[in-house]
Image (spheres, helix red, strand yellow):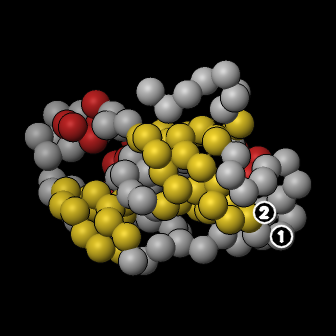
Amino acid sequence: MMKAVVLVDKTNMEVQEVAKPSPKAGEVLIKVVYTALDTALHEVPNRTMIPGSLLHNLKVTPLVAGWHFSGIVESIAGGVDNLKVGDAVHGHLQYSSKTKQGTLTDYITVPASECAKIPKVLTWM
């Protein structure tokens, strides 16, 4: 289990315990180091701004909030050859009504093709 910020309905978010995901073929499991609190998420409780993609996925609540991530590759499923365990990566997670997965959590699974390595000259500041 892990903690996640969950959109429980169209106006409420709360911290919940959720299952830790497992990567499928072509995916990596990432330990999230940093994520972003987007303006869209801040405005959800006030319903003053809800982007179309988030509005669509709010129809299938609950779902974990967040889009952007940086973190460390913790495990790799079959079919991944561009990343290895321990690589620092970043990216933008595409919401899916199937996974209900976002980045405001401890771990995420992401297609390896949607991750970019963070150059070694950069540090976690």
- On the image, numbered disc 1 is attached to which residue? 78
Q: CA distance from mark 2 to mark 1?
A: 6 Å
* Residue depicted at 25% across the width and 69% down the height: 16
Is 75 placed above or below 88 here?
A: below
Amino acid tagged 2 = Gly
Residue 86 lies, in percent from the top left, at: 68, 52
Q: Is the residue under label 1 in contact with that under label 2 (CB below 8 Å)?
A: yes
* Residue depicted at 66% across the width and 32% down the height: 118
Considering every residue shown, the one lying at the far top of the view is: 121
Amino acid tagged 1 = Gly
Task: In the rendered structure, find residue 59 and report the number of the disc placed on it.
Answer: none
Is 86 placed above or below 89 here?
A: below
User: Looking at the figure, which quarter contains the N terminus?
Assistant: bottom left
Task: In the rendered structure, find residue 26 and report the number of the disc placed on it.
Answer: 2
The quadrant in which residue 58 appears is bottom left
The quadrant in which residue 43 appears is top left
Q: Judge whether residue 111 can be spotted in this image.
A: no
* Residue depicted at 50% across the width and 32% down the height: 124
* Residue depicted at 15% across the width and 53% down the height: 11
Element type at mark 2: loop
